[in-house]
């Protein structure tokens, strides 16, 4: 983890947010009722299916749209807002704030925050209930900064076969940022956890009816107090050295490194200590996976009720080829630098391998800068195609615990945990 943010940086953040001057109303920046400015997708018509056997598009098939504080992104839905990061942004280990993916669960999301009245409440089974203001978080706690990947649990869901319901994400429902905030444990300890507490529940500001037939109205997630990830988690108020974009959780969001984004509660407003397990919709039945190796099962066993389901948690190891992307013919005999990223929820990536054929020989790629155990790790490999034809480039990653990407895809009813070895088809033409 990186060194703490300097006091001067904190003062700058306070000035940017106008905390010293009192309230900060953001309604003049965020008028979501006007919806997004939609743009037609460039190039050839998009298919309705991006899954296996269709030489899938890297991103989903949604139209390009521009939302406040965001560059043009791939839009799955506008209520709730779901935006996917275009492929080209993943050439670097750090994803820009304006291109960072967005995933809300309920249709009513905040479009203004008044920092003069906003408070983060810590309540429930505690000795000293707290109401922390934004300046409290900046001034009363020692800040910490680290890089970590935030990935939607359903990233790459469009690859599942048979298809499953839910947002049909391509590969762009993920991003990596440098997060600055306060140790979550420090806040919990300040409140004084009473004996008998078993879980900590986090709630954000989004509201709505939830999935049809399964009303939820509020988004809440919980973690066991014995989970060591709480020692690494922070309540973040800055993202890549700037205030969080509204769509990514302003003014604060929980950062749970190594875990899927479902626990990274946006617009965090209250924290409750519970003396019994949380059974709200977003914990059960929402976001649960089979208690099987890799979270894999089949439709028949699910229908027969044979599959035990448990809450989703850490992300599996993954790697992606970002360039070349297959859109341009490559001359035979021309050296090409194949570039990509890799990450794991179980610790640092220790190896990425590259191949120019599905059954070809794997060879080690060169790893880029190590930004931390839960950050994107860039990689590159030199490749010179010997002759004209179609090639399938592939990459696979290994993390420090020995987890390796599999050759086969996973299947479960939630469309989670996809981490099959990625392939990229490229065309090589004869050099003239």
Image (spheres, rainbow, N blue to C red):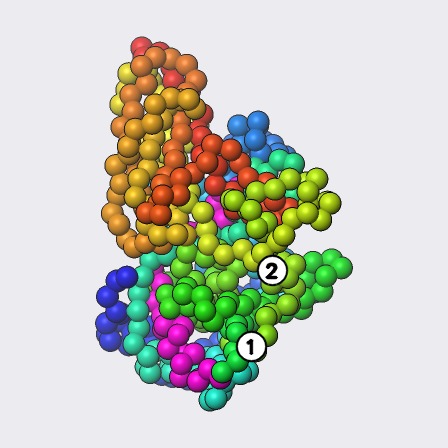
Queried whether the magenta region covers residue 424, the answer comes back as no
134 left or right, relative to 205: left
Queried whether the magenta region covers residue 185, the answer comes back as yes
**Residue 234: x, y in percent?**
39, 69
**Residue lying at the far bottom of the rendered structure:** 128
**Residue 86: x, y in percent?**
46, 43
Q: Which residue is mark 2?
A: 105
Looking at the image, can residue 359 be seen? yes
User: In front here: 98 or 320?
Assistant: 320
Q: What secondary structure is marked by label 2?
A: loop
320 left or right, relative to 380: right
Q: Quadrant of the C terminus?
A: top left
User: In front here: 30 or 219?
Assistant: 219
- Which is more foreground, mark 2 or mark 1? 1
Q: Which residue is mark 1?
A: 274
- What is the distance, in whole Å, between disc 2 and disc 1 at their CAs? 23 Å
Residue positioned 46% across, 51% down in the render: 315
Residue positioned 28% across, 34% down in the render: 365
Q: What secondary structure is marked by label 1?
A: strand
**77 lies above or below 283:** above
Task: Identify the magenta region.
Answer: 167-194
């Amino acid at each position: 983890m990186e060194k703490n943010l300097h006091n001067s940086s904190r003062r700058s953040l306070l000035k940017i947010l106008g905390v010293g001057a009192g309230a900060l109303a953001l309604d003049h920046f965020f008028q979501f009722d006007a919806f997004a400015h939609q743009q037609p997708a460039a190039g050839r018509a998009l298919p309705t299916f991006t899954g296996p056997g269709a030489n899938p598009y890297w991103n989903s098939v949604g139209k390009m749209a521009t939302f406040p504080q965001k560059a043009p992104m791939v839009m799955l839905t506008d209520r709730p807002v779901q935006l996917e990061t275009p492929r080209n942004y993943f050439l670097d280990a750090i994803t820009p704030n304006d291109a960072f993916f967005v995933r809300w669960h309920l249709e009513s999301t905040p479009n203004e925050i008044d920092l003069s009245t906003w408070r983060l409440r810590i309540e429930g089974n505690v000795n000293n209930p707290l109401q922390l203001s934004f300046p409290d978080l900046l001034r009363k706690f020692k800040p910490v900064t680290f890089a970590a990947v935030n990935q939607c649990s359903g990233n790459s869901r469009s690859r599942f076969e048979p298809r499953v319901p839910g947002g049909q994400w391509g590969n762009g429902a993920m991003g990596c940022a440098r997060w600055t905030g306060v140790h979550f444990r420090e806040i919990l300890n300040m409140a004084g956890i009473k004996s008998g507490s078993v879980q900590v529940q986090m709630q954000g500001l989004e509201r709505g009816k939830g999935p049809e037939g399964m009303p939820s109205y509020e988004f809440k997630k919980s973690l066991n107090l014995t989970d060591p990830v709480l020692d690494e988690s922070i309540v973040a108020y800055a993202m890549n050295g700037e205030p969080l974009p509204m769509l990514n959780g302003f003014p604060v969001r929980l950062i749970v490194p190594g875990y899927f984004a479902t626990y990274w509660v946006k617009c965090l407003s209250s924290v409750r200590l519970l003396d019994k397990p949380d059974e709200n919709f977003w914990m059960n039945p929402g976001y649960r996976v089979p208690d099987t190796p890799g979270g894999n099962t089949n439709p028949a066993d699910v229908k027969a009720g044979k599959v035990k389901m448990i809450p989703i948690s850490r992300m599996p190891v993954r790697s992606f080829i970002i360039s070349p992307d297959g859109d341009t013919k490559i001359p035979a005999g021309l050296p090409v630098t194949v570039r990509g990223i890799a990450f794991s929820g179980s610790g640092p990536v220790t190896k990425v391998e590259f191949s120019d054929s599905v059954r070809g020989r794997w060879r080690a790629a060169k790893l880029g800068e190590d930004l931390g155990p839960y950050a994107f790790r860039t990689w590159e490999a030199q490749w010179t195609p010997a002759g004209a034809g179609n090639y399938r480039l592939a990459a696979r990653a290994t993390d420090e615990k020995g987890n390796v990407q599999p050759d086969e895809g996973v299947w479960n009813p939630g469309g989670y945990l996809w981490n099959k070895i990625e392939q990229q088809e490229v065309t090589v033409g004869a050099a003239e």
